[in-house]
Image (cartoon, coloured by chain):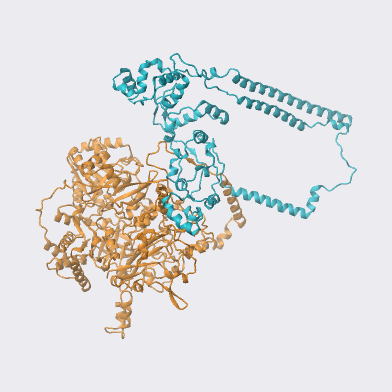
Amino acid sequence: MATTKKYWKSTAQLDESNEIVKDLEKNEFAAPIPTEEFLGNEEALESSSTSRRDFLKYVGFSTAAASLAACEGPVINSVPYVNQPERIIPGMANYYATTIANGYDFASVVVRTREGRPIKIEGNRDIASRGNANARVHASVLDLYDNNRLKTPLVKTKEATWDELDAAVRKELNANAGKDIVLLTQTFASPSVAQLIQDFKAAYPNVRHVVYDTVGEDAALDAFEAKYFVRGLADYDFKDAECIVGVGADFVGDWQGGGFDTNYAQSRVPENGKMSHHVQFESNMTLSGANSDKRYPVTPTEQKHIIAALYSKIVGGAAPSNLSDKVAKAVEETAQKLRRAGSKGVLLCGIPDQDAQQLTLEINEKLGCTIIDTAAPIMTRQGSRKAVDQLINDMNKGTVGAVFVAGVDPVYSYDDSGAFAEAYKKVPLTVSFASRFDATAQISGYVATTPHYLESWGDVEMKKGQISLMQPTISPLFDTRQMQDSLLKWSGSDEIYRDYLKSFSKENGSNWNQSLQDGFYLANTSTEEQNNSEATAVDNSAALRNLSNAKAAGDFELVLYTKISMGDGTQANNPWLQELPDPITRTTWDNYMTISQKDADRLGIENFNVANGALDGTYAVVKMEGVERKIPALIQPGQAQGTIGIALGYGKTAAIQEEMQTGVNAYPFFKNGRTIQSVTVEAAGEVHEFACTQLQNTMMGRDIIRETDLSTYIAGDQHEFNPMPEVSLNHIETPVTSPDVDLWESFDRSVGHHFNMSIDLNSCTGCGACVIACHAENNVPVVGKSEVRRSRDMHWLRIDRYYSSTDSFEADEAKKDGFSGLFGENGSLGGFGELEIPADEPQVAFQPLMCQHCNHAPCETVCPVAASSHGRQGQNHMIYNRCVGTRYCANNCPYKVRRFNWFLYNGNDEFDYHMNNDLGRMVINPDVTVRSRGVMEKCSLCIQMTQMTILEAKKDGRMIKDGEFATACSNACYNGAITFGDINDKESEIYKKKSQDRAYHLLEEIGTEPNVVYQVKVRNI
Amino acid sequence: MINKKFQINPFKLTITSLVMVFALWSGQSQALDTSDGEPAVPVEVNESEVTESGGNAELGEALFKANCAACHKLYKNAVGPALFQVSEKYSREWLYKWIKNSSALIASGDAQAVAIYNEYDQKNMNAFPQLSNEDIDNILAYTDTSKPVATEIVGPEVAPAVADNSMTNNIVLGALALVLVVLIVVLVAVNSTLKRFAAANGIQTEFEEEDQPARTPIWKAFVRNQFLVLTTAIFLLLVSAYFVYGGLMSVGIDQGYAPVQPIHYSHRIHAGVSKIECKYCHSSARESKHSGIPSLNVCMNCHKSIAEVAESTYNEGLEEYGIDYNKEIQKLYKATGWSEEEQAFTGEEEPVRWVRIHNLPDLAYFNHAQHVTAGNIECQTCHGPVEEMEIMYQYSPLTMGWCINCHRESNVDLKGNGYYEEIHKELSEKRGGRQLTVADLGGLECGKCHY
């Protein structure tokens, strides 16, 4: 029974005397309308030359002028196609399968286009692996319509034509033919590009290909290569896992390219009394730690010791134990659990250390692990930091005649970017294949402007043997050319890359047209070359020794990580991603240094909330040899003491709109491509303003998250783990859902469709893909940092993150009761200090929250103009053109899900995001109204999508099958947390979910009868 | 009192003269109308003439229109060459073979046939084995008919008469008007001269009845009667409120809006006379929310071979609407880049900027497919008698009240649609077996159209 737990969103809420929190709980709108500011100033009013009469005159005149202007309608032109393409029907969406491969994110996707414009990205559900799109992939459609993209090729930073560029590059290539020609690229994982580079070598024999991953996985790649002779990464399928142990590996997030969360989430749903058990040892609070059953905050050095200890316990060999008792005990338990799970157990390691990675592979092999797949590895990371370092040496030596940079921006992302830039400038011919004028492009001789992936051809082998195809979904918006086409041209071929790819794919086993439609094909396996297995034997005992003897060097250990919103920074100019709250810190538009409460107290670092609930924090200075950065500090519950975390991918300035130049560039700390560094930290005093949404829209301490443990759940007493609230009717306890205690008369919803949505708190990993999908589908505006700080974010769907202390407060209560006297073993003087600090080892729960579409909606009854009304299909309708902006509905909504348009976000220079320029507006979904100022808005359960599904069925004259109804968020949720459908169809998935014993409604006791149902979170403790 | 006779009102005079002129004019136009009833342009001459080779041109014309006209014209190249006097170019026996099965002739290696085949980009002409030699003779007789020249064939008495008539009428009218104007000037002059004489002779011309007591003017009396003032004020206020309200409520309603379009496209001819199904061109109305203005390639499906309208239609356009339909077709060719001479697209396209007539505000969602395909509603229900509209106009007010009203009153045709069947059964049981309206199915819910 976990419902007695205390949940909190911010540590500020734990302080019962915090007046700000109390105020916020009382106010729907954190910031009142500042009438006092301009009406309260008597002097200013008196000195104003505008009298009351003048004011009235102005009002009268402008009203009259406006009404006169309104009398004459504008003449609207319609321009049809001259030749309408066969497959385009105006007003109907077309779907194309393609693939994103930007060097950081790789996924098979389906693109929705309207009249030839891509407007939405969804995952490709047909593909067996890597068909899930994360938040960044969903947002990538907006990058296509980015005004800061390069529009023409550049020669010596001047706009030029392709002919000029080709002539110049060829001339210089031939002049420098004797020296090395280096291709410095992202990981393409593209078999056709590999072949193409071979062809290029035929024309220029000195060609060398250096692969550079911005956020590399060198240690894991080296270890895997040493053991399995392929430069790739092991794949994992957690679906059948029983015991998952993560050591510093955020595999629910972006670890090794991410994409593991889908089948991880499947293993987390208790079915037939079974679910996986997940233990996480980590420093930063990550998505993996947040989703785990047991989380131990440990430093990276301790993590190395843990790997060593696990190795010695499972495989054998002596490892001197230098772990604290608590951690040692945890490791012992974990080793037992792993052994018990056997082949269903798996260990994941995120330490950037080849020894640790090597031992992890050994442990998994010893377990006979079936979760890991080493036969068909993941190919999306192939970079080698050593080769890049070697390249810099060669460039300095002058042996390099030409460098082609593609898909990476080393001047921004290389740790010693100054050294790279210096060396790069020494090369006679430098060509950057870039789609924006990034830091590397700025110092390149030539910029061969490349198109966005939605305008390109390509193929990507994400997992060995499975090749995804990339096809254009729109003609190039600008004068761009793919790198592949340029290479073909420069190697003297007349072929275009599309034809090259087509013939290559056909040879490789593709049935071209069908494969393009599917988005992938399976490669001929016969071409697989077998490496000799007589490679040097790996020395495990040395690795074990190295790990056991690892020691922390500095005063703090810095753990660099990537945020699910920003990734490696490739998409930094994307306002949707900038405004996507981090799932853990709930902070937008920023990166920061996360630090534990105790360390913060020690250093004098503070976080505090100001009157409108916004979070402020003091700065800290992080120092490493040669690097010093001042960065705001955010106190993070669950951060291991002695560690700090900083997100990579921020602080980009080249070709980035000013509003999007956020945060601090942490790449200079990323020495040798290792995410773990030793640093010193000092408080720096000044105050930074965060745009953090964690205290916003609080639920006033009501019981909204329900959790239980697996044993209670298996015992099956629903009163225990999912009690129905009751009220007293004639002194008889009656469930609140009983019609006898209902004030309202219900509509008859038995005929037609009745939509419900189910959200499984067990499957929700907090990944945020649904939030971006909702943004894209429903034309949700971006409001910018200062508005988010004022609690005016417009997200229709938010993912609330709740903390709770591990064992509730019961243990504390028991201990407090046992105090006797002031001193001694049970003395209260020391005892109170020992009382667990709740923020140290919190448990985390995620809860996606959108309009609950109450059948008895409190918002509907208070609207003076009936702008909010109820549909028979269960949706709570919001009629924007009727709304006059009284905001009563938001005040009366117990779930805090209504959003008010304080400004005209699509026509106001203050909000210069995509809705304010013609290019950015191309992403707008034409089926959904773009809301105006002064209008309330909220989730509609994607009524445009359900209506479309119904219409398609009517057109075909057939019934609707289960699974056809979907919303943007349920489509985006590959983890199965969000299910949507028609509960009048008794065979449907949603009906089963609604009738499940874990199902509950939020705030059931107030009788709103929501149409969104949640599933109790079960922890396998 | 006699003096009063001298007062001739010049204003009255002008009016009278104008009325006279108008009466004359309208009589004239009536005369024009009657002349219109006669066939202004006889289309055919020598209708049943039998040519020397023995073919019947009348029968030939029917056969030509049924079999050949899709690709051939008499005096102009179309898909195939112009056929006027084709019988003089080739031998009759060869023509029989060619028409009955041209490809066989080409295959047989006939030099002439192969030459033609190559000249026309190796495109085969359809075979017409069903035509007898006699039929072909008839067709050839028709193709030998020389082009009727308008000035030659027009009945010599009728057309010039029309032209002369209108000319003389105008001259007569002009002369009459001139005479009347002169008359007015003379009368005014006489009047003023007489007045001057009178003044000089001391004759009083203005009379005032001063001996009667002063009477209160009517407006003063009115002002003093407060009741009357109040009633009038209320009446005026109500009237003005009525008009102001009516005026305001019509803001944004463009019923009857019929803008001038860049190409004069006649729905009357296409949907009315030619009876082309609406959804042949507006095909997306079946599938999509937009009915879609047809893309120009849809127009070219037919207009590749229809470069000119029939002469009767042409004249009707000129006379009734002042539109040269052939020029409008040329506009279409210009927009699509179609070259009539080469019978090919040049690639120089100029999309047409039509003026949109039905402008539903963005806040309302309307789906054509829902109404056309799912609802089986005729286009005319909302768009009015399009087949009679020479110029397209907005027939319905497109207000929310109009939508709602229809949703309340329209019964839904649920039969034969697999989607509705079950819902229909359950719902009509609940509604006591009565027919279901759109409203019963949730068609009045706000969120169905506003999101």
The percent coordinates of residue B2 (x first, y second) are 88, 31
* Residue farthest to the top, as pictured: B52
Q: Is residue A620 left or right of residue B137?
A: left
Which quadrant, please, contains the N terminus of chain B?
A: top right
The percent coordinates of residue A672 (x first, y second) are 21, 56
Q: How many marks?
A: 0
Splitting the image into 4 quarters, where does residue B106 fall? Answer: top left
Residue drawn 13% across and 49% down?
A530
The percent coordinates of residue A577 (x first, y second) are 35, 55
Q: Which chain is cyan?
A: B
Residue A924 visible somewhere in the drawing: no
The percent coordinates of residue B58 (x first, y second) are 48, 21
Q: Is residue A338 left or right of residue A883?
A: left
Residue drawn 10% across and 53% down?
A533
* Residue farthest to the bottom, as pictured: A821
Splitting the image into 4 quarters, where does residue B201 fall? Answer: top right
Asked if B90 appears above or below A79 in the picture, the reply is above
Q: Which chain is orange?
A: A
In this view, the residue in front, A891 or A731, is A731
In this view, the residue in front, A286 or A946, is A946
Asked if B253 appears above or below A865 in the picture, the reply is above
In this view, the residue in front, A104 or B133, is B133
* Residue farthest to the left, as pictured: A534
Asked if A1 appears above or below B365 in the picture, the reply is below
Residue B95 visible somewhere in the drawing: yes
